[in-house]
Amino acid sequence: MTTAHLAFDETNDAIADRVRVMRSSAVRDLFSAATRADVISLSGGMPDVSLLPASALEAAMGAALRDERAIALQYGPTDGLASTRRVVCDLMRDIGVRVKPDQVLLTSGAQQALDLLAKTFINPSDIIIAEGPTYLGALQAFSAYQPDVRCIPFDEDGMRMDLLEAELKTIGKGNPRLKFCYTIPNFQNPGGVTMSMERRKRLLELSHEYGFFVVEDDPYGRLRYDGGHMVPLKALDSDVVYLGTVSKTFAPGLRTGWIVAPKTVLARINLVKQGTDLCGSAMNQVVVEHYFVDTPWERTLQGFVKVYRERRDAMLAALDEFFPPEASWTHPEGGFFVWVTLPPYFDTDSMLSEALEAGVTYVPGNSFFPDGKTGRNSMRINFSYETPEKIAEAIRRLAGAIQDRLDL
Ligand code: PMP
């Protein structure tokens, strides 16, 4: 008698269709190469946590273990500890958004928020609008639910509203398949560009006119190196679903983020989250709460801003000095990334091995598009992690790899 086995070989018959369509993230794949001592990595998106003062970490973690052990070690509410959600409300008020704790749900980083939103809202072939290029972790999270992602190009003022409107006209008003527009208005990942106030207002008008909601992903908003604070979309329209995180202002290792949304939306997300993890880490939530209540975190943030500004300046200066006239790039006022565009025939995906040879990594532009093909003549480079000297050297090496291809 033969027994039927599920095939766990390379055919992977048992794997669900939604997982078959998933692609590995180029950034994750690059992680191992980027740790080689001779390679300077411009591919990651990591904050420099070595800038965090040990005293602040000890204060926040000590308080969690000393004073709040019983709560920190226990299961908590699915939407997160009320005391931590109150601290999130204070953080939101600082940036111009007034909300109550029952409009906040804590997540395991903004990444989980993206997955929960997708799980809650996306049926196969539903239409999602996003900047193109957009955050590849969002594309990964959405792809499991098989949406039809429509990408709208940006310029230095963020998503192009004329192109969005043209796309919306083809989709049609009140189309039930159209769900939400996912945007990173501040210092976009990977673009580095910021949506102007005029375009923020226009996007909200269009959302009401065409019947979709806006998901505002804002991990970098507080990391501004020039210019004044820009009011979040959430402050202009209470229907906006806002995603925040401590990953860039404190530490990604704490995996703490949040969704700010109307209560009716959060009630659904809460149900979905119960099936995902019951609740987030209470320990991490307590640490986050104490960090933002008991330590001079704003001073620490100013330290981050100062260091990242120097690194951004080093990158922009090196690009001016070393990059060929055929290349153009964005000029971010904050965040972590510069987006480089090369002539249309260029393929940064295949150039990566040559760059690695030259001792530098970046993320090829096609990683940031849902089809994995568009954007091959572009790349994302990161300036948050390496010293100004290493950034300048990395850009010099990268310029060499580009020049070799131009000379072919
Ligand atoms: N959204 C964007 C735009 C990001 O750049 C990142 C992190 N790189 C995330 C979400 C995920 O952040 P978290 O660490 O909070 O999960």
Image: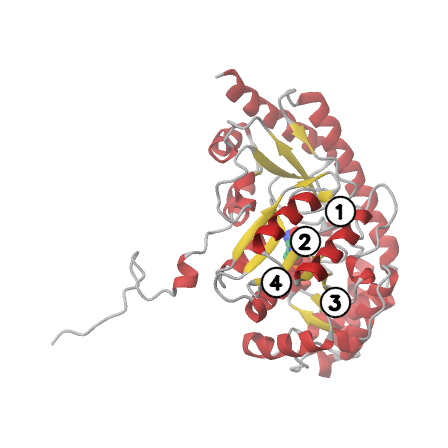
Q: For residue 381, what is the image quadrant?
A: top right
* Residue 28 position in % (x across, y down): 53, 50
Q: Which mark is residue 183?
A: 2
User: Which secondary structure lies at badge 4?
Assistant: helix
Of pointers 2 and 3, the one earlier in the residue sequence: 2
Which residue carries the number 1 mark? 195
User: Which secondary structure lies at badge 3?
Assistant: loop
Of pointers 2 and 4, the one earlier in the residue sequence: 4
Which residue carries the number 4 mark? 114
| Distance Cα–Cα, label 3 vs label 4 | 17 Å
Of pointers 2 and 1, the one earlier in the residue sequence: 2
Of pointers 4 and 1, the one earlier in the residue sequence: 4
Q: Inspect this view and state whether residue 208 appears.
A: yes
* Residue 55 position in % (x across, y down): 82, 60
Q: Residue at x 75, y 45 (%)?
A: 194
Label 3 Cα crowd, 10 Å radius (few <14 / some 14-19 / many 20+): some
Q: Contact (CB < 8 A) between labels 2 and 1?
A: yes
Q: Inspect this view and state whether residue 39 appears.
A: no
| Distance Cα–Cα, label 2 vs label 3 | 14 Å
Q: Nearer the viewer, residue 110 or 255?
A: 110
Q: Nearer the viewer, residue 162 or 345?
A: 162
Q: Is mark 1 within 8 Å of ligand 1?
A: no
| Distance Cα–Cα, label 4 vs label 1 | 20 Å
Q: Nearer the viewer, residue 226 or 315?
A: 226
Q: Quadrant of ligand 1?
A: bottom right
User: Which secondary structure lies at badge 2?
Assistant: strand
* Residue 58 position in % (x across, y down): 78, 64
Q: For residue 215, what is the image quadrant?
A: bottom right
| Distance Cα–Cα, label 2 vs label 1 | 9 Å
Label 1 Cα crowd, 10 Å radius (few <14 / some 14-19 / many 20+): many
